[in-house]
Image (cartoon, rainbow, N blue to C red):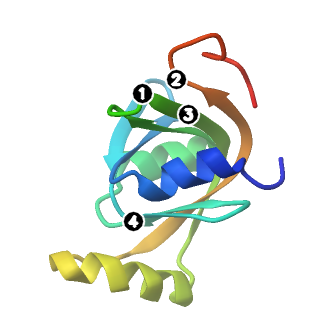
Amino acid sequence: MGKLHSDVKKLLEEAKTWVLSTCDDKPNAVPVFFTSAKDDELVIFDVFMAKTLDNIKKNSQVAITVFNDSTMQGYQVKGIAQYSSDASLIEAGNAVTGNFNLTTKGAVIVQPQEVYVLSPGPDNGKQI
């Protein structure tokens, strides 16, 4: 897909919570708090993931939803996820999660494939 549209990246960076959706036989959606948005990938630091990681191992296709209820702006990013235990990612995660006395175990890295508008209006549901 290439780089994320600037509006999408900005909302991802500003949002306190993303919703990560995975699926094996049944859908699973969890709020995620320790995140990072880059131009061509999204990083979610693993602190509590169990079912989510099991699902990603079985089906790497995921969706991330982010929404600002004040501005009514929202997007869904669909992509391919992989898990990483890279030491530099764990260190970056611990710089954030350590503030909450939590430990980063690894990271889910999502390569965006498609982005859809969730904002009310004529563009709702459109792929950008």
**Label 2 packing within 10 angstroms: few (<14), some (14-19), many (20+):** some
The answer to the question of whether label 2 and label 3 lie on touching residues, with beta carbons closer than 8 A, is yes
| Position above or below: 26 against 120 | below
Q: Amino acid at mark 2?
A: Ser
Label 4–label 3 contact, CB within 8 A: no
Q: Which residue is denoted by mark 1 in the rendering?
A: 72
Instruction: Identify the mark nearer the N-term, 2 or 1.
Output: 1
Q: Say which of 67 and 100 sits in front.
A: 67
Residue at point 74%, 25% (across, down): 127
Label 1: element kind: loop
Q: Residues within 10 Å of mark 3 (few under 14, many from 20)?
A: many
Q: Are marks 2 and 1 in contact (CB under 8 Å)?
A: yes
Nearer the camera: disc 4 or disc 1: 1
Estimate the x, y position of residue 27 in percent, counting from the top left: 44, 26
Residue 105's tag is none
The numbered dot on residue 75 is: 3
Check residue 46 in the rendering and tell me which mark sits there, or answer none: 4
